[in-house]
Structure formats: C-alpha cells, structure tokens
C-alpha cells in the first residue's frame, strides 16, 4: 500500500513537455511505415512481376483473379520517385485522382475537431470523474463488457476504422480508473480485432470470401462461432489479468515510464477529486448528444451503408450543435474544432503512409506473383498440412494486404479451389483466411487501424508488441487446434 502511494506521488511530478516522456528509442510509426515502403519497393526489383487475368464476379461485386491464368509480365520496379510519391498516393491516386485513404484521413480530422469541441465544454472531464465515483471498486468490469460490445461490432460488420473514434474517449476513463493507456488500447483494438478474427456474418470478410470461394457464407459458421467465443474469452482474460496487475503495481505496466505523461495528456483536469465532480445541465445535454452521435454512426455503418464521408459529416454537424448548445461562441467553437483536428493530424498522416505500402506493391505488380507462389506450394499436400500451410500463407499475405475484403478478393478465387484436391472443405479455407487476417491485424504495421489507434493512445509500437506477443502465441495455438480439428471431423 505504501509502495503504491510512493509511485503515484512520483507520477504527479509532471514534465513540462509530456511528449518527452512519450519518446522511445524504438522508431516512430512514421519511420517504420516509410521503411516498409522502401522495403516493398526493393522487393519489386527482386520479385518477378506477374498477373492473373481478372473477371467480374457479380456475387462479390468486383473483379477477381481467374485460377490458372497467371503469367509473368514486364516488370515495373519502383524507384526513388515512386517511394517519395507513395505517401501521397496512399491518400489518392495522383494520376486518376481516385481516393485511397483520403476519406479515412478526413474522417479522423473531423473526429478530432468534434472531440476538441466536446473538451471545450468540460463535459467529458467532469463525466469521467462522475463515472469513476459510481464505479468505485468495480472498474475492472468495464473491460469484459466493452470488449464484448466491440467484438460484436467486429463479427457482424467488420468494425475497424470506426474504432478510431473511441480511443480518445475510452483512454481517459481507463486512466482515471487506475489502469494504463495500453489497457484502453487493448480493449478497443483486441475487442474489435477478435470479432473480425471470428467473423460470423461480417460482409467485408466472411461473406466476400465465401462468395469468392463459391460457397454459402453460412458454411463453417459453427467453427467460426467457436473461434469467436473461445478467442474472446482468451482475450478478455488476458487483458483483465494485465489490468489487475498494473493497478496493483503500476511499475509493471509496459508503459510505466510514460504514465505521468499519459495522465497529463488525457486527464486535462489532472487528479482532481472524483467525489467533487458535478455535471451541469448543459454538460449533460452535451454528453447525451455525444452518445447519440456514436449510436447514429453505428446505425449508419451497420444498416445504411455509411462510410467515412458520411461519418465525418455526422461528427462535423454534431460539433456545431454541441458548440451552439454550450454557447461557446463562434471563435471558441472554431478554435476548439481546429485544435482538436490538429491533435489528430499525425494519425491522419500515418493512415496515408500505411496505404502507400499497398500502392507500391500494386504498382510493382508483385502481389499476384506472391499469390502464385502460394498456389504452387499447396499442391498435393495432405489435409492437415494443407489447412495449416494455408493459414500461414494467409498470415504472410495479410502483412502486405491488410484489408480483409482486399485479401479475400485477391486470394480466395485462387486458393479455395485447391481445397478440393486436398479433400478439405472450402469453408475451412475461408475460416483459415479470416482468422489469419484477424490475427495479423492485431499488430500489422501496414494496417491503418493499428498504427492509428496506437498513435491516438500515445503507445509506441514496440511497447504494444511487448504487451501483446504472449497473447498472439496463445491465439495462434488456439486457431491451429480449431482449424486442425475442424479438418479431421
């Protein structure tokens, strides 16, 4: 008890510049992603260029690769200028002006502006302290409840980019409860991620992959429910165990050195007395609108086909409404919005860099060559070897193609038919694909959701790896057992 008091006292000695304590010897996300752009560009000089013929698949709604049509083509190695253009091309195609990740980046900026206006009302800070007063002694139960909710979003509609809206909201609550920033990031990233890993009716993973494989998406759904429920229980247990350990002894946090800086960044009210928190009527109304905005976003994405542009417009409109109700005035409203957007500008840039990696690979025409190598590797293997090698091939490809729908369209038309020769159900191939993609996207540095979430949470990539690597091993063993047993049954 006395030792914990001593640690808290040291944490209160906040630095003038919290970013100093957040620094790490490990390279920043920007350096990692630009390094990966250079690496992939170098691979376009080493890996032969090749392409499959493409044909429109009406069920999938896209052009898909035609099995048996792979052929080498003239190489298009990516040079110095292409590398420098990649971050821009990550946002939009500079030749055709077709959008790539610009919509996600704009959504992040609008989200930041919305949060800036909310912070200006003081409602979030006061609300956090009020919530902590009511949850006193039961804060740990926030973890399973929230992770289940995020997992439902992941398994039903592939909740991914939308989660970026929740980091700046949840992390202050988690810090006020006595946990660390990694706990907050884990609740969101792992919660939604395990839902995608165990996708049941996710249209952006399971449905597209099943259609591309030529089977009903309901085939294999029982096995996917086992992956979802078992994986979720493993992840909840892992995060709760870590959170309890950190609250008991803050020095055991993987970001212990950044604890004070995180508090200063996320808890603007500092360590004010929780029991003194009282919400005004205006703040209560602001919080109601705040909650309704997220509810409308989830409704729009899950049932109305909304995507980033409409989501960004929603947050923009909600910021104006909240600013008017809180009587912030024109100057404070616009200033708060711009300041909030500025806080997430780095996250928006990270999204473009991550997409730039995929652009380089596509322009260098090496994705189909990698896929063709996987196709030849799987031929003639026995059942267990086939399904497990399929899983690891999809793991490798997920680093280059983090998008679940993109990987499904790229790989399923080629790899799923090979299951017929190995006497393995095509539904198992779909399950291996989605579990591999979901697993990798818990740490994938080319996935905007990972690097963006970590950037908002101010958790460096190396600290995230230090936290999550044991869980990755446990999940890998669990997935391997499930798909192997499913193959033998």
Image: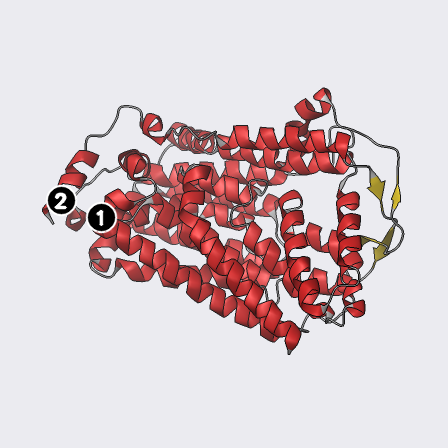
Pointer 2 residue: 3
Q: Taking the image as drawn, is residue 49 in sight?
A: yes
Q: Residue at x 67, y 46 (%)?
A: 401
The residue furthest left is: 2
Report x, y in % for residue 247: 24, 51
The answer to the question of whether label 1 and label 2 lie on touching residues, with beta carbons closer than 8 A, is yes
Res. 249 mark? 1
The vertical placement of 25 against 430, above or below, is: above
Q: Residue at x 70, y 50 (%)?
A: 406
CA gap between label 1 and label 2 equals: 9 Å
Report x, y in % for residue 442: 51, 50
Element type where label 2 sits in the image: helix
Label whose residue precedes the other's in the sequence (1 or 2): 2
Report x, y in % for residue 245: 27, 53
Report x, y in % for residue 440: 57, 50
Q: Is residue 13 toward the left or the right of residue 240 in the image?
A: left
Q: How is the image coloured?
A: secondary structure
Q: Could you tell me which quadrant the C terminus lies in?
A: bottom right
Q: Residue at x 70, y 30 (%)?
A: 41
């Amino acid at each position: 008890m006395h030792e914990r008091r001593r640690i808290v006292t040291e944490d209160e000695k906040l630095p003038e510049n919290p970013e100093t304590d957040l620094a790490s010897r490990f390279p920043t996300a920007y350096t990692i992603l630009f390094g990966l752009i250079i690496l992939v560009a170098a691979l376009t000089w080493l890996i032969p260029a090749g392409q499959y013929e493409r044909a429109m698949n009406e069920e999938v709604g896209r052009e898909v690769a035609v099995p048996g049509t792979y052929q080498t083509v003239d190489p298009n190695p990516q040079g110095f200028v292409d590398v420098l253009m990649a971050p821009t091309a990550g946002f939009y195609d500079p030749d055709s002006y077709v959008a790539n990740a610009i919509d996600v980046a704009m959504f992040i900026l609008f989200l930041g502006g919305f949060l800036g206006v909310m912070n200006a009302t003081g409602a979030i800070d006061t609300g956090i302290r009020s919530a902590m007063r009511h949850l006193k002694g039961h804060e740990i139960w926030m973890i399973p409840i929230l992770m289940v909710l995020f997992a439902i979003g992941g398994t039903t509609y592939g909740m991914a980019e939308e989660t970026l809206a929740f980091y700046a909201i949840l992390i202050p609550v988690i810090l006020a409860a006595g946990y660390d920033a990694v706990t907050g990031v884990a609740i969101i990233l792992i919660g939604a991620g395990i839902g995608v890993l165990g996708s049941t009716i996710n249209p952006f993973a399971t449905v597209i992959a099943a259609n591309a494989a030529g089977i009903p998406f309901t085939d294999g759904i029982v096995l996917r429910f086992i992956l979802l429920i078992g994986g979720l229980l493993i992840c909840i247990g892992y995060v709760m165990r870590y959170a309890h350990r950190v609250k008991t002894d803050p020095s055991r946090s993987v970001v212990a050195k950044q604890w004070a800086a995180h508090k200063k960044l996320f808890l603007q009210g500092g360590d004010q007395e929780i029991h003194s928190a009282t919400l005004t009527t205006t703040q209560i109304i602001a919080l109601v609108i705040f909650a309704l905005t997220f509810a409308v976003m989830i409704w729009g994405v899950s049932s109305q086909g909304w995507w980033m542009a409409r989501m960004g417009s929603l947050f923009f409109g909600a910021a104006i409404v909240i600013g008017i109700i809180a009587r912030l005035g024109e100057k404070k409203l616009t200033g708060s919005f711009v300041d909030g957007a500025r806080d997430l500008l780095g996250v928006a840039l990270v999204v473009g860099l991550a997409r730039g990696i995929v652009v380089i690979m596509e322009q260098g025409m090496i994705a189909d060559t990698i896929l063709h190598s996987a196709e030849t590797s799987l031929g003639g293997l026995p059942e267990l070897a086939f399904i497990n090698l399929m899983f690891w091939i999809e793991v490798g490809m997920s680093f280059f193609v983090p998008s679940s729908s993109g990987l499904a369209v790229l790989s399923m038309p080629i790899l799923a038919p090979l299951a017929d020769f190995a006497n393995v159900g095509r539904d198992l191939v779909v399950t291996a694909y989605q579990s591999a993609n979901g697993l990798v996207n818990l740490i994938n540095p080319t996935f905007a959701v990972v690097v963006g979430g970590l950037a908002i949470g101010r958790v460096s990539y190396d600290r995230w790896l230090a936290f999550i690597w044991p869980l990755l091993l446990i999940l890998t063993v669990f997935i391997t057992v499930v798909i192997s047993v499913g193959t033998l049954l």
